[in-house]
Each structure stands twice: as structure tokens, then as C-alpha cells.
Image: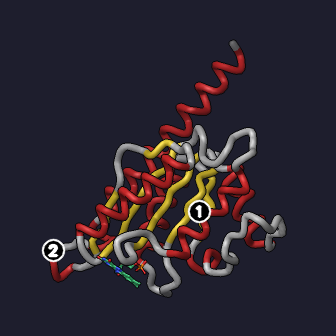
Amino acid sequence: MLIVGIGGTVSPTSSSDGALRIALDEAQRQGAEVKIFSGDLLKKLPMYDPTDPDRTPEAQEFVEAMRAASGIIISAAAYHGSISGMLKNALDYTEDMARDERSYFAGIPVGSIAVAKGYQAAVNTLSTIRMIVHALRGWPTPYGCVVNTATDEGGTGVAGAEEGLRMVASEVVHMARAFESHAQIVANS
Ligand SMILES: Cc1cc2nc3c(=O)[nH]c(=O)nc-3n(C[C@H](O)[C@H](O)[C@H](O)COP(=O)(O)O)c2cc1C
């Protein structure tokens, strides 16, 4: 079972990257194979062009990992009331999966993590991730983790959110296993 983590920013001390790595650590602890596509890779993806079928090696690797995933975890920093342009551009590459037998994120669980300097932006960004996941026919998992990095305003930062970050991963792994056993029952019936 492969769980793919997508997110983080270009910041060398990215908190949304750190949050994603904690969640992926939990997925791995629960027996999943994990792969991360963070700022260092996402920043190399050219602006998604649906009219040009040529893809860079990085873009091909990214799309193939999303195709192979049994579950996804998205970790977004709040940028001006939404997710960053870099992360949105990466998620636009799912358009290459539109005509796959399993189109976009159909039938797979997607966990959401939102990081911001304040709860309001974090919660708005969490909703944005879930709206994108719905558009991609994915299954947003019930618990979404918001991380407030404004510690001077009562935020707990990434370290204080560890339990919630592990919960996101736990639900993704749980749902991925449930979906896979359902698919096996249907195939054998
Ligand atoms: C371009 C930009 C826009 C931002 N917009 C918001 C915002 O609208 N609301 C907010 O609470 N924080 C905002 N922030 C703060 C980030 O969400 C916050 O610092 C987050 O921890 C950054 O994630 P990172 O550490 O992974 O880079 C913004 C930061 C940047 C760089």
C-alpha cells in the first residue's frame, strides 16, 4: 500500500513540510509505503499545460506516484486565503489522470493538513483542500488537521499538532485498507 504525501513550501524550514513528514511517519508505522513530493520537487514542475502532452521526468514521476497511490495526504500552507500557487499547479497535474480507469483520486482517501499563521486562514485552507479533493472525486477523510504557527497568538505549531497529524494518516491508512478489501470482495463475487 502506497501513501503519497504532497505539500510543503519552498522554505527550507517549511512547517507544512514538517507536518506532512510527521503524518507520513505514522502511515509508515502502520505498514504503508510512503513517498513525499515536497517543495524541492513541486517547485520544479512547469506550469501545467493541458495542451502539451510532453512531461518532464519530475512531472512523470509525480503523476505515476499519484496513479499508484492507495491514499494521499495533502499538506498546504495558507497563502492569502488559499493554498499556494505551487501546490495548486502540482494538483493540476491530476488532469493527466482524467481518462485513467481510476480517474483523478476516485475511490481513494485523501487526508488534509493546513498550516497558517492564524486559525482562520488554516481552517479556510483546510476547506479549500477538501473542495479540490471533491472536484477530483477523492474521499476526504473525516479528521482534518489545522496547524497554527503563530505561537505568540496561541498557536501550538507543528510539534503541538503531532497527535492530530498522526490521526490524519491513521484515517487515510484505515480507509485505504477498507477500500482495498471492499474491491477484493466485489472482484470475488
Ligand atoms: C505568500 C504568503 C502568504 C501568506 N498568507 C497567509 C494568510 O493569508 N493567512 C495566514 O494566516 N498566514 C499566511 N501566511 C503565513 C503562512 O501560512 C505560514 O507562515 C505557514 O506556516 C507557512 O508555511 P511553511 O512554513 O510551510 O512555509 C502566508 C505566507 C506567505 C509566504
Q: CA distance from mark 1 to mark 2?
A: 31 Å
Q: Determine the image quadrant of residue 64.
A: bottom right
Question: What residue is disc 2 on?
Answer: 154
x and y percentages locating residue 88 in the rendered image: 54, 68
Instruction: Say which amino acid is labelled 1.
Output: Leu
Question: What residue is disc 1 on?
Answer: 91
Question: Which of label 1 and label 2 is nearer to you?
Answer: 1
x and y percentages locating residue 172 in the rendered image: 48, 46
Residue 75, numbered label: none
Secondary-structure class at tag 2: loop
Residue at figure coordinates x 55%, y 39% from the top left? 176
Secondary-structure class at tag 1: helix
Hey, which residue is sitting farthest front in the picture? 51
Q: Is residue 136 above or below residue 43?
A: above
> Is 48 left, or right, of 182 in this rendering?
right
Residue at figure coordinates x 29%, y 69% from the top left? 121
Hey, which residue is sitting farthest bottom in the picture? 12
Q: Determine the image quadrant of residue 34.
A: bottom right
